Image (cartoon, grey):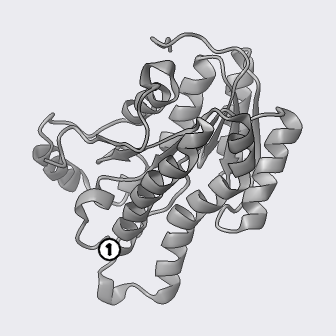
Amino acid sequence: MKTIYPTITDKVAVVTGGAKGIGACIARRFSDAGYSVAIGYRNSAEEADRLVCELERCGRRAMAVRADLSSYDGAKRLRDAVMTEFGRIDVLVCNAGSSLYKLICDTSEKDFDGVMGDNLKSAFLTTRAFYDDFAFSRCGNIIYVSSVWGIKGASNEAAYSAAKAGIIGLVKSAAKELAPCGVRVNGIAPGAVMTDMLSHFSSDELADIEREIPLGRIGSPCDVAGVALFLASDAAAYITGEVITVAGGYEL
């Protein structure tokens, strides 16, 4: 897959939740642009190893790191592995997360804590782990993957929507905090994208979703990956603190 952006030869991108779905497509796009890529994962070891082999066969440097990013120890493990292997970080894509499809009345405290940990807490702690590396290098990009539900909310997905809304707040705060260091921080809010998160929907339900999308189709991970690469590029050099919705008009 070719990219419209200049080829990079000496930069490093870290993609959390990078073993499959949106994260894997983002990892491929950055690798295709010449980045060395570190893939953070928690459970998808087979997929992560397969993706690393795929990228290496294309002549790129890649590594996979297993870490539970909902704890600072896990985030620090990811950071230390990246610095040991590559010695730098230029782009951090916080994509790790999980969904929860339950009514508020059926959502337990454990459910709520799990969704917050997988989505919002993991993004915060991963940023904290790499914070000094970005601040002292005085350059770089952090990109958070939120959701259209973080903007408009979703019935039966209150905990997930709240976590993704929190990520939007993190985008705004981190952008202000890191701007004096020359670090840009932005977010992406995907809509309905064909990943495992839609696997519990029937074909009829997916067809109903498509009918609600002005562009008439469910998105692909590549739709999101292209925006991530743009935000990290010099073409977005004057963009920070923004959240770009990638939803085919679903949010309208």
Q: Which is more toward the observer, 239 or 204?
A: 239
The quarter of the displayed image where residue 9 is located? top right
**Image coords of residue 12 (percent x, y):** 70, 29
Local secondary structure at mark 1: helix
The correct choice, above or below, for 173 with respect to 145 in the image is: below
Residue farthest right in this picture: 84
**Image coords of residue 248 (percent x, y):** 21, 37
Who's the residue at 56% across and 54% down the image? 96
Position of residue 61 in the picture relative to residue 84 (left or right): left
Q: Which is more toward the observer, 87 or 108?
A: 87
Who's the residue at 74% across and 14% down the image? 59
The quarter of the displayed image where residue 198 is located? bottom left
**Image coords of residue 148 (percent x, y):** 29, 53
Position of residue 167 in the picture relative to residue 216 (left or right): right
Label 1: few (<14), some (14–19) or many (≥20) C-alpha neighbours in 10 Å: many
Position of residue 76 in the picture relative to residue 70 (left or right): right
**Image coords of residue 221 (percent x, y):** 42, 36
**Is residue 201 in sight in this rendering?**
no
Q: Which residue is mark 1?
A: 158
Query: Hey, what amino acid is under mark 1?
Result: Ala
The correct choice, above or below, for 87 with respect to 204 in the image is: above
Q: Which is more toward the observer, 200 or 78?
A: 78
The correct choice, above or below, for 192 with respect to 155 in the image is: above
